[in-house]
Each structure stands twice: as structure tokens, then as C-alpha cells.
Amino acid sequence: MTKRSVDLIGALLGYFIMFPFIIIAILICAVDTKSAGLFLQQRIGQFGKPFVIFKLRTIHASKNTISAWGCFVRKYKIDELPQLINVIKGDMSLVGPRPDIAGYYDVLTGEERKILELKPGLTSEAALKYVNEDAILAQQSNPLEYNDTVIFPDKVRLNLTYYYQHSFWGDVKILGKTITLLFQ
């Protein structure tokens, strides 16, 4: 069974199970943020090709602040559920490096560019390690600098390790860790 077929089966199954919950969450986010409820953003995908990622909107449109509901949605990664559509479309995989905005993975050089050969994923070892990234960055005097000099280089290291060592059972293990983490 190929990685793509596992992704497709897993995403379709997850989407159909979670569909009512996703619709309710979109509606609550729409009311809460006074928006359409979805956040669309261009991210860098496999081979450096840009794609549009789907997320639940958690930031008030007028205030540019995260709502209380948005904090809950982000804490439990509910805002990531619409990305099952990205997996179904083939833009993403269930497991792989988390997609980032332009200016990060797309500007890597040398061996680190191998990460771009992978499809971005819903989860990864780097995503699990930095599950509380927003809280870590909030504690820094210069969050962008800390991200660029500490967190992002560590994510690159973890994702390059994944590039060389990924396997079906490794992906199953990462998915298992992710599900366990979500229910803690």
C-alpha cells in the first residue's frame, strides 16, 4: 500500500467521521471571529510548490487578537481539521514536515532542501515537539528571532531525520503519538 493511498483512506475516513464537527466548528468560528470561519493561506508544499492551506479562523477580523474560542481550538489543534481536505487533494500527507509560509523551507540550501521532496503533513515529530510553540514564543522577548534561530533550525533537523528514516510504521507511530497527545 502506498503512502498516498494510506493518506487518502485515512483523510477520507477522518473527514467523514469529523464532518459534522468540522461544520459546527466552522460556524462557531465564523460567529466568533465575524468572518467566514475559515482561514486560507498560501504555504510552501512539496518541491517548493505553493498551495493554499485550510484552517479554522481563530483571530478576530477587526481586533487581530485570538479569541477565547480560538485559544481552545488551537490548544486542541481543532483548527487543523480542515487540512484533511488538503490531504484528500494531495497537497499534504498525514505525516510529514508541517508546511510553512514562504521564506522558510523554500529558502533552505544544500542537504536541507531534501525536506522539500516530502509532502508537508498534518503532523510530524517536529510538530509534536513544538506542540506548544505559541506559548514558547510568547515567553520570548523577540519571538521572531527565537523562531528563526532556535525553533526553525531544530524543526529542519527533525524533518531531515524524518526524510532519511521515514517508513510506514514510523508514520503509524507518529500518528499514534499525535492522537494520544490530543486526548491528554
Image: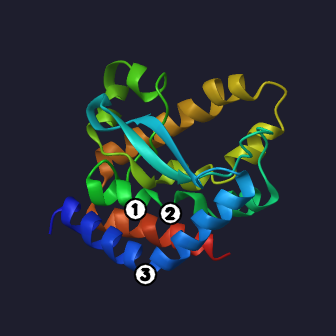
**Residue displayed at 26% across by 32% down:** 47
List the single residue furthest toward the left: 1
Near mark 1 (Cα within 10 A), the count class, few <14, some 14-19 or many ≥20, is many
Vertical position of residue 35 compared to residue 85: above or below: above
* Mark 1 secondary-structure assignment: helix
Residue 88 picture quarter: bottom left
Relative depth, front residue between 88 and 173: 88
In this image, 117 relative to 31: left or right?
A: left
Picture residue at 33% right of the left edge, 19% below the top: 110
| The N terminus sits in image quarter | bottom left
Please report the residue visible at 47 percent of the width from the left and 76 percent of the height from the top.
Answer: 18
Circle 2: element type: loop
Q: Do tag 1 and tag 2 residues touch (Cβ < 8 Å)? A: yes
Question: Mark 1 — residue?
Answer: 84
Residue placed under numbered mark 2 in the picture: 81
Marks 1 and 3, Cα distance to the nearest angstrom?
Answer: 11 Å
